Amino acid sequence: MILNASGCLDALTAPAVARELDAYMVKTITLEPRAGNPQPRLAETDFGMLNSIGLQNPGVERFCSEVLPRLEELGIPLWISVGGAEATEYAEVCARIGERRAVHALELNLSCPNVDPAAEGAAKIVAAARAATEAPLYAKLSPLLPDVAGVAKSVLAAGATGLSLVNSLRGLALDEWTLEPQLGRGVGGYSGAALRPVALAAVFICYEATGGEVPIVGMGGVETGRHALDLIAAGASAVALGSILFRDPKAPVRVRAELAEELGARGFKHPEEARGAAHRPQSD
Amino acid sequence: MPVPRKERRKVAGSERVGVYTLLRFERGGLDAGVPGQFFMLELPGHIVPRPFSICLAPKGELGFLIDPVGPVTRELCELERGQEISLFGPLGNGFRTDVDRPLLVGGGIGVAPLPYASQLMGKPPAILGFRTRRHAEAAKLVPKAEVCIEPMLVTELIPAVPMDVLACGPEPMLHAVHALVPDAQLAWEAPMACGFGACYGCVVEFEGESIRLCVEGPILNGRPPVLPILNVSEEEKAE
């Protein structure tokens, strides 16, 4: 299963790209509208890019009245990323959108590096969201957590259906001459190739910690079918494409074809057969 | 409006124009678009492509004016004839060119989209401002251009009579032009990672509105945007 990472595609401006995904992940929605962070919001750095968008979104009310109906018309299964400053906000957004027919799952953004973190812990937010909706809930965790497996277990105990691993790292780039931060907000989210081994490790650790029994959406620097296969082998049941979509709108088609080839070359008929392959004892 | 495509294209030529470089590519199957539209240019070894407005579109070619101010622009200026990079476009809304009393106004590298506009609009009057005489050599790309060098500013040369202004330049210049000619078409700029509405990197606030420049711009008060941008598959495009 191939999705986009939240905030890396707009299905309304690029429906041809969204139609090539198994599900379209809607950019994070919060209870109130958010204008986002000041310019500049983007910077390129070695091995990755920095973004500082700041969860710009129209708020759940306008999203439901103006955006969601148009997304539903596309006929693509929708996953919606949900954000907030506190657990009650997450819960209210989940309650408003969780039961819409086109909405297949909600992803709780518990780890955006571009906004102040919610005051409560991840498990409390998940529990509040779980009380508000019966929709499948994926907890999106940061790779910066010192004990990602521990947090994964706590959000699953609180009612999460699965895990989304990982969000971007926090990063900084300075201007060549002024030596001031290139981004308007200073630090931003670091994504791209550099995130790959970090994401792979988080998926690997969480798959092991959860006995391979929960769905995991793996993401972070996926650019090719081989990268997708690595995440699957580490334990991902689905893979999301992030910043690669910015420069290669054909990535969903290409990565899917490459993944099929990579699986076939190793004797796997289906991605599920390769899931967790990294955890099996090596044969001689 | 033309359908954007992404293709690898060869450099057809590269000429110095003062401090700038006019980089020309073989056009291939790419559409030249309308003045004020842009292409994303992707250099190997770089993660984020960069937007450049169409400067000139001679037969079979696409030209971009580059100011070598950072690593990517410096590398672009060093590309040689025959080297190949990816071009994705045309993107953005573009200028409205069917205006009655056109006046082109450009500042610095903001002169970039004006040669193409001038060509398609029958060489209307133009006012161009630059930091130095060396920068001002780019004025030769725009026929009938009146040129000023700092400390003189383009706004000092805009006539008091009503004109349909198409402007591109640094933000302070655009604000000043807007204050003088409220209905001017303004080519705005912000860092952009995708060019088709995905990244939200290029959002600016203008008159209380939040605008994604790649989708609803880059020309504020320009042509109405045509959405969606990527609506047909490659197979459908080929048919």
Image (cartoon, rainbow, N blue to C red):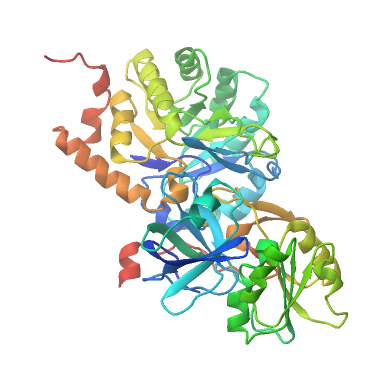
Q: Residue at x 50, y 45 (%)?
A: A8
Q: Nearer the viewer, residue A177 or A4?
A: A177
Q: Residue at x 45, y 31 (%)?
A: A194
Residue B118 to residue A152: above or below: below
Residue A264: give x, y in percent of width and height. Answer: 16, 38
User: In which quadrant will I find the N terminus of chain A?
Assistant: top left
Left or right: residue B20 versus residue A270 is right
Residue A232 to residue B168: above or below: above
Q: Nearer the viewer, residue B183 or A107?
A: B183
Residue B199: give x, y in percent of width and height. Answer: 55, 48
Q: Residue at x 31, y 44 (%)?
A: A255
Q: Is residue A11 visible?
A: no
Residue B187: give x, y in percent of width and height. Answer: 67, 65
Left or right: residue A177 versus residue A231 is right
Residue A15 to residue B158: above or below: above
Residue A54: give x, y in percent of width and height. Answer: 64, 38
Q: Quadrant of residue A22?
A: top left
Q: Is residue B92 visible?
A: yes
Left or right: residue B211 versus residue A230 is right
Q: Residue lying at the far left in this picture: please name it.
A: A284
User: In which quadrant will I find the C terminus of chain A?
Assistant: top left
Q: Nearer the viewer, residue A149 or B42?
A: B42
How many numbered discs?
0
